[in-house]
Amino acid sequence: MLRVGIIGFGPRGLSILERLISKKLGQIINDKLEIYIFDPNSLGSGCHSPKQSSRLLVNTVASQMIIFADETICPNEFFIKDPNFYEFLLSKGYKADKNGYYSRVLLGKYLEHSFQCILKLCSQDISIHIVKEYAQCIIQQEKYFIISGENTKIEVDSAFITTGHNQNQNNFPMYSAYPLEISTQNISANDAIGIKGLGLSAIDVITMLTSGNGGFFEKLNNELIYNPSGKEPKILVFSRSNLPLMARAITQKETREQYQAIFFNSTTIKKLKKEFKKLNFEKQILPLIVKEMEYVYSYTYINLKSQEDSFLFRNEYLTSIDTQSVLDKYIPKYDQFNFYSLVNPLQKIIDKQDFYSQLITYLENDIKEARLGNLKSPIKSACDVLRDVRDNLRLCVDFGGLDEESYKFFIHSFVPINNRLCVGPPLVKIEELLALIKANVVNVLHDVTIKHIENTQFQLVDSFNNSYCVNRLVDARINEIKINDNALFQFLIANNLATKFNYGNLELECLKIDENFCSINKDNKTIDRLFILGLPTEGIKFYTFILPRPYIVSTFLCDSNKAVDSLIKRVQV
């Protein structure tokens, strides 16, 4: 009998379960299979709980999300056939658009439905046990592990750690954005709320404080207008970049369609990695990414006027030594792609009113480009390149592929830019933000300095020396996992079953793994059959929180498949 523990049962844990059951049903696993799932709350949905507000949207279109592997992941093998998110919505009677954006509530229902579908397929020699407890420790014996929860001890041959986001503690005096029911509760129109961050979490907080508080939007002359309820607090938002994430463009690509890089491709990266022990992101990688974006922007721009010229341009650009002369031939200088203007779109800010004016223009232009779509808008098609070449980025960065200084630049400079350009909310959320700013419900502040006054009161001072007092400050930035805050991770490290990963001399907030996802301890020894995937490895791996996409060799699904295959090789000689 093969006994397996899955610790943490969000999408990652669900994917491991699917791979195990598929391989058992496909007779790749010969032994009887007994699986123990440790999670007190989730049945596959993780942070996409069906119990949260239906106003909160997923920022990926429905047809580009799935939890099941396909033939691109495991060719010539049996795999469970089941729907993607869009197909699930149709099967449940929703009038869904394959390129539509839907609530996290519905995504959570899809993930939990997928778990139930897997359960229905289990034969008599497969047993699945749900342990509604947190795993607190794992002890290694000679040939097995003991997983202990609050009241349970289970012996297993192998354990998969697939825990996701930690439940944030709303530490006094600043609130964490999540859970939203805590950070946005007990607030009235007399309150002033500061929100630190302008990303997806900030959008969630703003949504709950506005339309989640009785206000509503209506369309007038193709523009959203916000009608306040009178219950909204004063909302002051700020971030390091002073700008919100860019809106996701209307999707015009087919489900299986993904841009294939010409300059920043895997062949080029492998050559660089063969030549250099560590890569320099700023000098060796970023120029290739910018060139890729320039190429896509340019042929999309030309195609708006002439398809014939667009194809001529492509051939000339790809075969010319002097690409600048080719650009000059087809595109006026002022309209040519400029990565650094894209990164810094605001001109020199004079005062508060100038910032407001430039911000409104920026948002209006972003909405206009997003409505054009990700194949017709030159800007959005270029930004979409960043999504489609993510696996090539991983090839550069994963397992310490950059030198230490370069990694600092990548994390602190490039990743925030990348997120703003291509990981934004659905278009409607930026339309809503613009409406809220114009209605004076939301105020975006420029270059803010924070001073704690007392209790939960803070003073916010912008770059123009305007001062604002808030009686609640919400931290809506991305929260990385804190290894030392997790009892299980602390236990593993203390018992030499795991260690933190160092990027040169930088100690990261992630656990060290080998390329088969087995844990590595402080002695650099692989802990056989103890696998770690997902957010606990964010740092040694890149962008581990992206849900799988069908038919494109999803890294998420490949990782699950590779880890399960590695287990099978170890237990079936």
Image (cartoon, grey):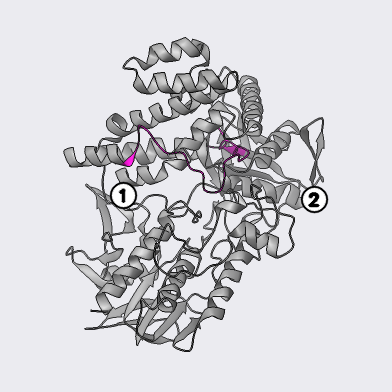
Q: Residue at x 59, y 48 (%)?
A: 59
The reply to whether residue 342 is in sight is yes
Q: Quarter of the image containing the N terminus?
A: bottom left
Q: Compared to 402, does 131 lie above or below?
A: below
Considering only order in the chain, which callout, 2 or 1, is on the residue closer to the N terminus? 2
Q: Secondary structure at mark 2?
A: loop
Q: Secondary structure at mark 1?
A: loop
Q: Which residue is mark 1?
A: 398
Towards the viewer: 503 or 210? 503
Answer few, some or many: residues within 10 Å of disc 2's Cα (few below 14, many 20 plus, some between 14 and 19).
some
Residue 191 placed where, x, y %? Answer: 70, 46
Mark 1 in CB contact with mark 2 (< 8 angstroms): no
Residue 465 placed where, x, y %? Answer: 56, 26
Q: Compared to 235, does 67 lie above or below?
A: below
Kind of residue at disc 1: Asp
The answer to whether residue 235 is magenta is no
Residue 124 placed where, x, y %? Answer: 48, 89
Towards the viewer: 113 or 361? 113
| Left or right, 432 with reference to 345 | right
Range covered by the magenta-colored residues: 237-266
| Left or right, 238 with reference to 277 | right
Of marks 1 and 2, the one in the foreground: 1
Q: Which residue is mark 2?
A: 214
Residue 360 placed where, x, y %? Answer: 66, 26
Picture quarter containing residue 326? top left
The answer to whether residue 249 is magenta is yes
